[in-house]
Image (tube, rainbow, N blue to C red):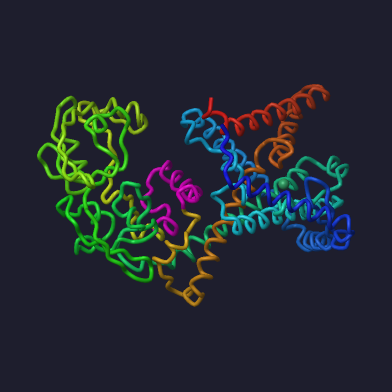
Amino acid sequence: MLGISSGIITALIIIVAFFIIFAVLQKLGVLKRFGLELTVPFLVWQTQKGKKFIDGTARKRKRFWKNYGSFGIIVASVCMVLIMILVIWSAMLASQIPADQAPTADMVLAIPGVNPLIPIWYGIAGLAISIIVHEFSHGILARVADVKIKSLGLAFIVVPLGAFVEPDEDEMNNLSKIKRSRIYAAGPTTNVVLAIVLVLIFSTIFMGSISAKQDGVIINQMSSGSPLYNLGIEGGQEIVSIGGVDIEGIDGFRELDIDPGSDVDVTIFDGDSEKTYQVKTGLVVTGIGKDYPAEEAGLEVGDILLEIGGETIRNYHGFIDYMDGTEAGETYNITYFREEEGDITSQITLVDKYQAYEELYPTENREEFKGTGYAGISVNYLGISVWDSDFLPAMLARPFQGAESFSEYVSSGMTYIALPFLGLSPVPENIANLYEVSGPLSILPTSSFWVISNLLYWVFWLNLMVGLFNALPAVPLDGGHIFKDGVRKLTEMLNIEEKKKEKITSSVSYILGFTILFLLVWQLIGPRV
Ligand SMILES: [Zn+2]
């Protein structure tokens, strides 16, 4: 089933209101005065000034733009290959994704206000900028090739969803293939070039000047079984000390040596001040596999592990080390603490880790897991997953640090683009509070620094999306036209009849276009069949 989120409903209400208001204004004759016209489904704004600007820009640096267009054909072709790999790869993954984790329609659409991951104002700004530079680039290259521009403007459905620079169609058809391809390639190229420039500014200049105020660990996700959860503590705050021990980074957190189940002071920093809470410490069960040993032994989410096989489990590393030494099929005593019931001891018979991984995480399975015991629980200290206090500058300013192989570079790059999917968009306000700005940019008011940072990221992100999407080799997208002209050029090198050349060209481009459409739709349907 396609999930209809409240985001879509809100968007629908706004869209309907938008059309009613502009339909009334159109009736009253107000719209015309501003060059606006409502032609459902768009509110269209046409401008003459834009035409003059494009004309002037094209005339002044004709040579530069011509070279830019030729460079653009290379950039657009590279993007075409990359986006095709990405589309095929994600369509292949689609059939492996369980239905409840499948993307919903609103997640796939990169439209601010519809996609819940895109913050609305940054999203609108990013989309508007990417569309405008895209269309102006087409326009400038059209003028360089002496093609007339019939109309120019923006098309709105609440936000500017499309911009159009409509070159004279007959003149376009009479152009040489290379000139026409330059015009089509310029749009995606400007998006991609702008995206690269902006992401460099964002990462080196902006994220390069932040540092953590304190050395603790930042709460990322919190299980409902966490003792911190009931105290109303939220993610994005920093734990600076536990039981009087200062936490220095994630390793310090994972190696804390405190008796499990004891009440300790946990000091939490929100960016401005510190607060101390009394918390029962230890490894908290955050998830239980259905029909696995832990469930059969009676464990529940929220239980705190005390002992397994007579050994006290003090921290995450302690748990992993102990489990690595267990044997499948053996029975162990397990003692845990449960709120209101106190300490409980029961027996757990472990299953084979290799077989369990084969079922649960086949891609992470390893030969050496054979024979090792597996309980089927996930545990986390205090029931939370944490980030190192330094994670934000490390991830955003030095994303490729530590990457050695080609695939590590690729995955670091993908993570950078996927930040919104990790709950970072890219820097939520509560997390921003934990960092201070140093260097020349510290003259900016802190709030402006973060607004500009987020804006840079989103304008980068949407330019990349608009650029890559338009490079898809499917007519009417720019990539489709470039691809079609390329295939036509190939047929001309072969010794066949004129009529057949046209036929081959359009068949190839139709088949590819439909394949792409299918692959895109498959990402929604694939996981659900
Ligand atoms: Zn375009």
| Residue 502 locus on image (x, y percent) | 80, 27
Depth check: give the residue in front, 120 or 75: 120
For residue 403: magenta?
yes
Residue 106 appears left or right of 322 = right
* Vertical placement of residue 107 versus 257, above or below: above
| Residue 40 locus on image (x, y percent) | 81, 46
By secondary structure, the bulk of the magenta-drawn segment is best described as helix
| Residue 376 locus on image (x, y percent) | 27, 33
- Farthest left residue? 310
Q: How many marks?
A: 0
- Farthest bottom residue? 443
Q: Name the residue located 68 percent from the left edge and 40 percent from the top edge.
A: 479
Residue 109 appears left or right of 303 = right
Depth check: give the residue in front, 268 or 506: 268
Q: Name the residue located 50 percent from the left edge and 50 percent from the top edge.
A: 420
Depth check: give the residue in front, 472 or 483: 472
* Vertical placement of residue 351 versus 319, above or below: above
| Residue 512 locus on image (x, y percent) | 67, 29
Q: Name the residue located 49 percent from the left edge and 31 percent from the top edge.
A: 99
Residue 363 appears left or right of 60 = left
Q: Quadrant of residue 195?
A: bottom right
Q: Name the residue located 22 percent from the left edge and 62 percent from the top edge.
A: 265
Residue range highlighted in magenta: 394-423
- Farthest front residue? 340
* Vertical placement of residue 109 versus 441, above or below: above
Depth check: give the residue in front, 172 or 178: 172
